[in-house]
Image (cartoon, rainbow, N blue to C red):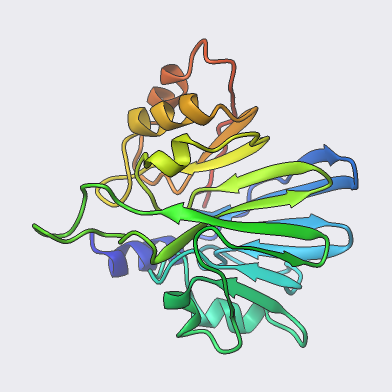
Amino acid sequence: MTRLALALTLTAAAACAAPETFTTSAGALQLTPIQHASLMIQAGGKVLYVDPAQGSYDGLPQADYILLTDIHGDHLSPGVLAKLKKAGTVTVAPKAVAATVAGAKVLSNGEKTTIGPFQVEAVPMYNLTRGPSAGQLYHDKGRGNGYIVTYGGKRFYFSGDTEAIPEMKALRNIDVAFVCMNLPYTMTPQEAAEAVRAFHPAIVYPYHYMGSDLNAFAKALDGSGVEVRLRNWYAN
């Protein structure tokens, strides 16, 4: 399936799973899976979206802040951005994305910023070996961002599209991780589990997993001490 076909397929299916609530030193943080790589965070009276592109946004609040990871259509939708933006919305993105999103604040791998009550760190996401043809990769190093979002002392990691790169394995002190897995664009469940074992978050959610075997991911983490939470990001 091509990137365009994937984006169209996902857009056709509206999904919004039940929210997950986390306790932090600054109060509760509520995270709502929307679809595929798209999710909403509500905390401190503010609304932050990560990759709002897929699923339905009917009835959801407009954004105070938006984080974008990559240029592909399953992460970046101009139409959805227009629907969610309001006066004062702050959008953070890597340079390649910011070039197509008016007014976006550029954040590169390794850089940090603060948006309202959230501290945001951009981290690498890229392919090691997988690509559309010989000598090409689906995601080049440095083009896109994963993100670590800190609120009330709790650190949430969103992998974006990546393989099990050394920078992911070197992460530390992650409380909650959202880790991608799907072929051919990112990695297998087993590869994702290998990376998770290395950086050992307290809790991990597979996301961006269309067509992947989540049970294989969970089984590969048996005995690791990492809590695996499986949620349906593709409900009709």
Quarter holding residue 87: bottom right
Q: Position of residue 22 (x, y in %)?
A: 79, 39
> Camera-side residue: 51 or 159?
159
- Is the N terminus in the top left, top right, bottom left or bottom right quadrant? bottom left
Point 46% across, 85% down: residue: 100
Quarter holding residue 93: bottom right
Q: Position of residue 177 (x, y in %)?
A: 59, 39
Query: In the image, is residue 163 above or below residue 170?
Result: below
Point 49% across, 48% down: residue: 159
Judged from this view, the residue extending furthest toward the top is: 223
> Camera-side residue: 2 or 189?
189
Left or right: residue 127 compared with residue 32: left
Left or right: residue 185 compared with residue 133: right
Viewer can see residue 1: yes
Query: In the image, is residue 81 above or below residue 235?
Result: below
Point 38% across, 69% down: residue: 72
Q: Position of residue 142 (x, y in %)?
A: 39, 63
